[in-house]
Amino acid sequence: MISVDTHIHTLFSHGKATPEEMYEAAIKKGIRVFGFSEHSARPLNMNYPREYRDHLAAHWDTYIEKVTALKDNKDDVTVLLGIEMDWMEGNEDFIKTELAKHEFDYVLCGIHFLENWGFDYAKADWESLHYNELAAIYEKYYSTMITMAETGIFDTIAHPDIIKIFSCDDFTKWIATEEAQVLVNKALTAVRDAGMSMEISSAGIRKFCQEIYPGETIMGIASKLELPITFGSDAHSTTSVAFSFDKLEEHARRFGYKESVYFKNRKMHSRPF
């Protein structure tokens, strides 16, 4: 049974529940290692059409205080203070400055932007794109993953094929090609060599693509590379904490995984499931 969930958001960004409510939901699901990973700040030119930046900034200190207080719980649950830091190529100094503000247990890397485009926001952005254009976007995504890993800033690559979110059929076609698999292998090798882990996430099941992140081809590549894995629900509400973890466990075991990892004080720890 998976007892670790290290991808959690709250109402302090665009979630729906307090840290305390998310924690209580985790207790009920049998989670023993629970990591809060609220979204990071972003430069002003990195915008979604509907932004939560000001709300997050206004309540950030309160969020840190609440998560820190939950660490001192009586439930024998390891509570971790993480962050989902957006990878924004060319903004490495900004990222390092933000991460230096607190002693985070771990840093998830969320690749949500290619240049200034928040690609996971609107399905309409993808509807007019032809296959060759989509393939170029997929290639750019995995190329920037290599650049990200080589910085040594991050601990885990979150939802490693989120780029498929609005074009799953075309992504499946692309990932089946030899060229795509060579590129993904290079990206995951860079992640492994940086001492990072790869997240297996149930968020995709709840999204338009209705698939686990990552799919089977990427899982196969990761397994051959012996890339450590983590588990995350990417929960934004209490009902999504540890969402479909039975499916994630089956998915991981199919590729030979028997344990997952988590980071505490930026050091990797393993836990069987």
Image: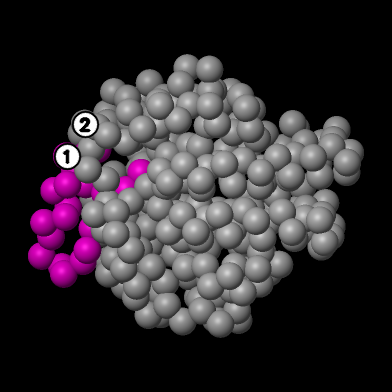
Is 67 within the magenta? yes
Q: In this view of the protein, which residue sits in the foreground, 156 or 210?
A: 156
Q: Circle 1 — which element?
A: helix
The answer to whether the residues at label 2 and label 1 have Cβ atoms under 8 Å apart is yes
User: Please, is residue 138 above or below residue 51 in the view?
Assistant: below
Dot 2 amino acid type = Asp
Q: Report the magenta residues as a range.
A: 63-83
- Count up the numbered dots: 2
The location of residue 233, given as percent across then percent down, is 46, 58
Q: In this view of the protein, which residue sits in the foreground, 222 or 193?
A: 193
Question: Image point 62% across, 41% down: which residue?
Answer: 144
User: Please, is residue 112 above or below residue 237 in the view?
Assistant: above
Does residue 236 appear to the left or right of 202 in the view shown? left
Report, in whole angstroms, how far the alpha carbon at label 2 lies from the one at label 1: 6 Å
The residue wearing badge 2 is: 61
The image quadrant where one finds the N terminus is bottom left
Crowding around mark 2 (Cα neighbors within 10 Å: few <14, some 14 to 19, many 20+) is few
The residue wearing badge 1 is: 65
The image quadrant where one finds the C terminus is bottom left
The location of residue 218, given as percent across then percent down, is 66, 64
| Quarter residue 112 falls in | top right
* Visual colour scheme: one colour
